[in-house]
Image: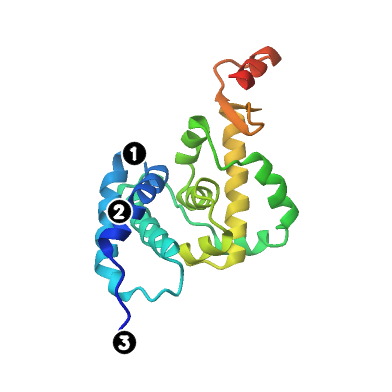
Amino acid sequence: MAKQEPDFKKIHDTYAPRIRHYLEKLAGVDEADDLTQETFAKVSRSLKNFRGQSSLWTWLYKIATNTAIDRIRKNKLAGHDLGLDVAEEMADQNVWTGEILALENHVIRREMNSCIRDVVSRLPEACRTVIVLSEFEGLKNEDIAVILGLKLETVKIRLHRARLKLKEALSKQCILYRDERNEFACEQKHDSFIGKDRILSLIKK
């Protein structure tokens, strides 16, 4: 018996909202609708070739990510070389540990506020993509590796580098604090010094 092809309309209706939300974070609000339409046009054309070797979610993310990256590069949104040097990645493998990731996860939260999202949007493409997939979408490193066509160790290294870049950028323009849910959030710096009372007031909001 021939394997039944997945129902495109059902897939679109089920997954399009989340894919659009993902693309908005990856490429910006202005591009999200068009990229979602382009992504699902590709899904429609490729659905007959889907063999279930990865989950449907992972397959959709891969198409959406490649579509967004193509658009970002075409529009030159990043403004400079977005790739990571292979030699640097190999060298960084020596400093990568699970303990570092565990510590960083306390700082980089999945529920980022608008200040953090703004900083993320200005990261280099390679950094932004892994941060969005990991921290916004909550995907496992193994799934990110499949989506981006990278080795698992390379994904770990990119996440490590991306988190460092994010922290560095945040430290220049934001005050980090814990919100009422005891999660890290940030507030744009308007003055050179924000006192303890101001931070406490932010926490209570």
| Farthest-out residue, bottom | 1
Residue displayed at 68% across by 42% down = 106
Left or right: 45 as drawn, with respect to 154: left
Asked if residue 123 shows in the view, the reply is yes
Residue displayed at 67% across by 31% down = 182
Left or right: 150 as drawn, with respect to 161: left
- Of residue 187 and residue 136, the one placed in the foreground of this image is 136
**Looking at the image, residue 150 lies above or below residue 20:** below
Mark 2, other Cα within 10 Å: few <14 / some 14–19 / many ≥20? few
The residue tagged 3 is: 1
Marked residue nearer the N-terminal end (1 or 2)? 2
Q: Which amino acid does label 2 sit on?
A: Asp
Disc 3 element:
loop
Q: Where's residue 172, x and y in %?
A: 59, 29
**Looking at the image, residue 198 lies above or below residue 60:** above
Image quarter in which the C terminus is found? top right
| Farthest-out residue, right | 99
Q: What residue type is labelled 3?
A: Met
The residue tagged 2 is: 13
Residue displayed at 72% across by 62% down = 94
The residue tagged 1 is: 29
Q: Where's residue 202, x and y in %?
A: 61, 19
Q: Where's residue 13, x and y in %?
A: 30, 53
Image quarter in which the N terminus is found? bottom left
- Of residue 10 and residue 104, the one placed in the foreground of this image is 10
Disc 1 element:
helix
Residue displayed at 47% across by 62% down = 148
Q: Where's residue 16, x and y in %?
A: 33, 52
**Looking at the image, residue 12 lies above or below residue 115:** below
Camera-side mark, 1 or 3 = 3
